[in-house]
Image (cartoon, rainbow, N blue to C red):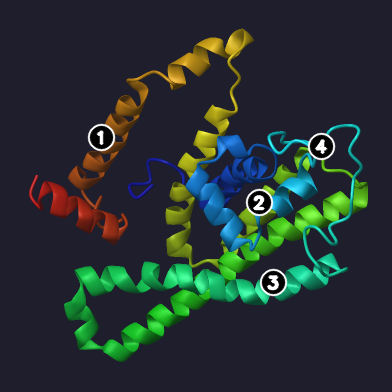
Amino acid sequence: VVYKKVPDIPHSDVGVFTVSQLFIMHGLVHATQALDHKYYKWIKHMGHLTEPQCQLTFRSRMNPKLQYRLPSEQWSTCYPILHRDTSCLRHNATDWVFGLSRAARIYLPVHFLPMILFEPKKIMQDPLQFLRRKAFNVMVSSVFLTTYQFNMKMSLCALRNWFQTDHWSHGVIGGFMTGMALFIENQHRRPELMLYCMPRAIEVACRLIPNKGHFTSVYQLLRCTYFPVFSFQVAMSVWMTVIAIPKGEDTSNSINMTVLKIIFGSKH
């Protein structure tokens, strides 16, 4: 893209991020076994959700291992299981405000620590400017993240109440709406978030592949002992290429480049 060999597609980072959310949010609602346990726990924390709320609302109430309700189980409204307010909109709007605090606790170290650890001299040159800039960045990121969780929960509430069912597509539609929240985030941060969520989405997609029929060979390949090693080699080759090519470091995340220099040295 830098050398104009590949066209720069406007908002492609938001598009890829949104596609990744289709898989991730489907995993949140109806395929929890496909999500990494810690990541699943983090999503619930950010959305102020508990496992009983999710299981009893979107999935089977009789069998906690089932990801969908049984035909014999009756559908119920969001109130009082998913939330205690009779209005979904009022509840989610109120939680959007509280979500700012939850998001700020996540983003404070993300925005402040890297420069404190790696570039303290720049901070000392103008500490007030550093505080103002980073505080603004934390605010923008917090608005993005709380809107991200609001869009998902509001989509689920609206869809399930309109259709009075919990269809598998609701999580996917909610994922599309969460992806749109990335437009709020600072433009230079969007690729980082996209690259963070892509592997999560690929992980979900791979875990959803069944071990039967034509998918058996793919299932076995993905779980081969050497496949993670091969994936790591591909990732490292990409990083080493970025370091080696002209302008590679200038157009990449400065924190990533700093860590790589610490590990591998600054001269190659």
Position of residue 95 measured from the top left corner of the image (x, y, whole percent): 69, 72
Extreme-front residue of the structure: 62
**Whether label 2 touches label 4, CB < 8 Å:** no
216 horizontally vs 5: left or right: right
Amino acid, disc 1? Ser
Under mark 2, the amino acid is Glu
Residue 98 image position (x, y, % from top left)? 63, 75
* Label 2, label 4: how far apart the Cα atoms are: 15 Å
Q: Earlier in the sequence, mark 3 or mark 1?
A: 3
Of badges 1 and 2, the one in the foreground is: 2
The residue that mark 4 highlights is 69
Splitting the image into 4 quarters, where does residue 214 fall?
top right
Residue 202 position in % (x across, y down): 51, 35
Depth-wise, is mark 3 or mark 2 nearer the camera?
Answer: 2
Q: Amino acid at mark 3?
A: Asp
4 or 3: tag closer to the N-terminus: 4
* Horizontal and vertical percent position of residue 29: 69, 44
The secondary structure type at the circle numbered 2 is helix
Rendered position, 154 above or below 12: below
Residue that mark 3 sits on: 95
Earlier residue among tags 1 and 4: 4
In the image, what residue type sits under mark 4? Answer: Arg
Q: Residue at x 73, y 75 (%)?
A: 94
Q: Secondary structure at mark 4?
A: loop
User: Taking the image as drawn, is residue 261 in sight?
Assistant: yes
**Front in this rendered view, residue 230 or 167:** 167
Q: Residue at x 48, y 58 (%)?
A: 190
The residues tagged by marks 4 and 3 sit, at their Cα atoms, a distance apart of 27 Å
